[in-house]
C-alpha cells in the first residue's frame, strides 16, 4: 500500500513539475506561446502540453491570446500581488519612489532579485521620463547598478555564479581584483553606479534596502542618461531613501511578529 501511495505522490509531483515548466516558458521576452513553442522548450509531447494548457486555461492561470497562442492569465497576477513580502515591500517603498521622482524628475525603480537576475518590481515616472528611459523588466545582476547593489552583499559563491553569466556588454570586471574593488566601493559608499558607454546611453545609480537580518531585500535605483548623470548627488538621495525604507520594513516586521 505504501508503494502505491508513493507512486501516486511521485506522479502528482511530476505533473506539478511539468505545469511549472510550462508556466516558466512565458516571459517578458516571449509573453505569448504556442503549443509548438512550449513543446520545444519543455520537451513535452503535444498531447501533454495541450491537456495541461486546457486545465490551466480553465483555472485562469493561462488565457488564449489569439488563435493557437496563449499568455499568462490574470489569476496568477492576483495571486502574485497577494504575496505578503512583495506587497509589504511595495506598500512601504512606493511613497519614497514618488518623492524621489519629484526630487530628481527621473524614472525611479524598485528592484528585486530573482536568482541571478534583477527585476523591476515597481517604477514611478512621468510620461516624459518614461518615454526617454524605456526599461527592461529583467536584467542580469551584472548588467546595472541595481544588480551591483545586491552583489556587494551576497556570498562569494553567488557572486561567482552571476559573474559566469555576465555578458560582454555588462559593466562588470572580468578579473577578480577589479571585481573585489568594485564591490568594496559599493559597500563603502553605500550605493552603486554604472556608467553608460556613450553620452546618450543609460547610466544607473542604486542603493540597497535591507531586511531585519541585514540581507538585501531590494534596491532603489535611478536610470538616467549619461549626459545628465550626477552620480554623487543621486547616490546620496538614494541612500537616504533606502535607509528610510529599511527602517520602515524593520518596523513592519516587528509589528507583525
Image (cartoon, rainbow, N blue to C red):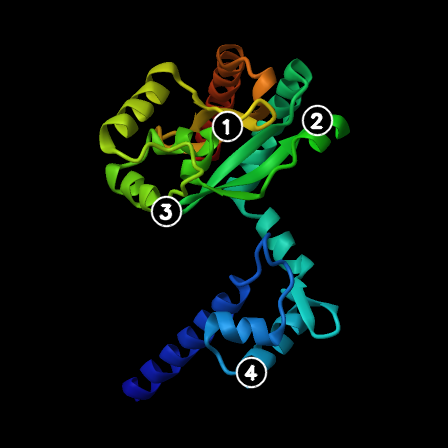
Indicate left or right for 117 with 184 as reference.
Answer: right
Mark 2: which secondary structure? helix
Tag 1's secondary structure? loop
Say which residue appears at 39% left-offset and 83% top-offset: 8
Question: Mark on residue 46?
Answer: 4
Q: Are marks 1 and 2 in contact (CB under 8 Å)?
A: no
Q: Is residue 53 above or below residue 154?
A: below
Image quadrant where residue 254 sits: top left
Figure check: 224 above or below 46? above
Residue 108 location, x and y as percent?
61, 26
Give the mark nearer the N terminus: 3 vs 4.
Answer: 4
Where on the picture, by quarter, is residue 181?
A: top left
Query: Real-space Cα distance between discs 1 and 3?
Result: 20 Å
* Residue 129's disc number: 2
Local crowd size for mark 2, using a 10 Å CA cut-off: few (<14), some (14–19), many (≥20): some
| Residue at mark 3 | 165
- In percent of the image, x 54 and y 13: which residue is there? 230
Describe the element under mark 4 as helix, strand or loop: helix
Amino acid at each position: 500500500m505504501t508503494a502505491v501511495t508513493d507512486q501516486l505522490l511521485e506522479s502528482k509531483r511530476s505533473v506539478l513539475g511539468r505545469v511549472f515548466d510550462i508556466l516558466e516558458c512565458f516571459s517578458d521576452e516571449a509573453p505569448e506561446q504556442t503549443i509548438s513553442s512550449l513543446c520545444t522548450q519543455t520537451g513535452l509531447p503535444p498531447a501533454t502540453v495541450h491537456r495541461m494548457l486546457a486545465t490551466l486555461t480553465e483555472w485562469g492561470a493561462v488565457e488564449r491570446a489569439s488563435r493557437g497562442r496563449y499568455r499568462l492569465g490574470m489569476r496568477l497576477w492576483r495571486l502574485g500581488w497577494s504575496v505578503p513580502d512583495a506587497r509589504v515591500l511595495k506598500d512601504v517603498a512606493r511613497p519614497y519612489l514618488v518623492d524621489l521622482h519629484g526630487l530628481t524628475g527621473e524614472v525611479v525603480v524598485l528592484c528585486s532579485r530573482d536568482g541571478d537576475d534583477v527585476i523591476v518590481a515597481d517604477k514611478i515616472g512621468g510620461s516624459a521620463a518614461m518615454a526617454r528611459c524605456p526599461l527592461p523588466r529583467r536584467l542580469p545582476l551584472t548588467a546595472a547598478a541595481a544588480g551591483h547593489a545586491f552583489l556587494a552583499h551576497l556570498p562569494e559563491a553567488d557572486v561567482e555564479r552571476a559573474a559566469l553569466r555576465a555578458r560582454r556588454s555588462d559593466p562588470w570586471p572580468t578579473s577578480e581584483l577589479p571585481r573585489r574593488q568594485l564591490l568594496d566601493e559599493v559597500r563603502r559608499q553605500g550605493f552603486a553606479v554604472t556608467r553608460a558607454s556613450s553620452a546618450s546611453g543609460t547610466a544607473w545609480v542604486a542603493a540597497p534596502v535591507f531586511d531585519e537580518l541585514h540581507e538585501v531585500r531590494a534596491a532603489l535605483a535611478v536610470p538616467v542618461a549619461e549626459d545628465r548623470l550626477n552620480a554623487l548627488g543621486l547616490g546620496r538621495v538614494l541612500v537616504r531613501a533606502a535607509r528610510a525604507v529599511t527602517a520602515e520594513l524593520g518596523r513592519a516586521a516587528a509589528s507583525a511578529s
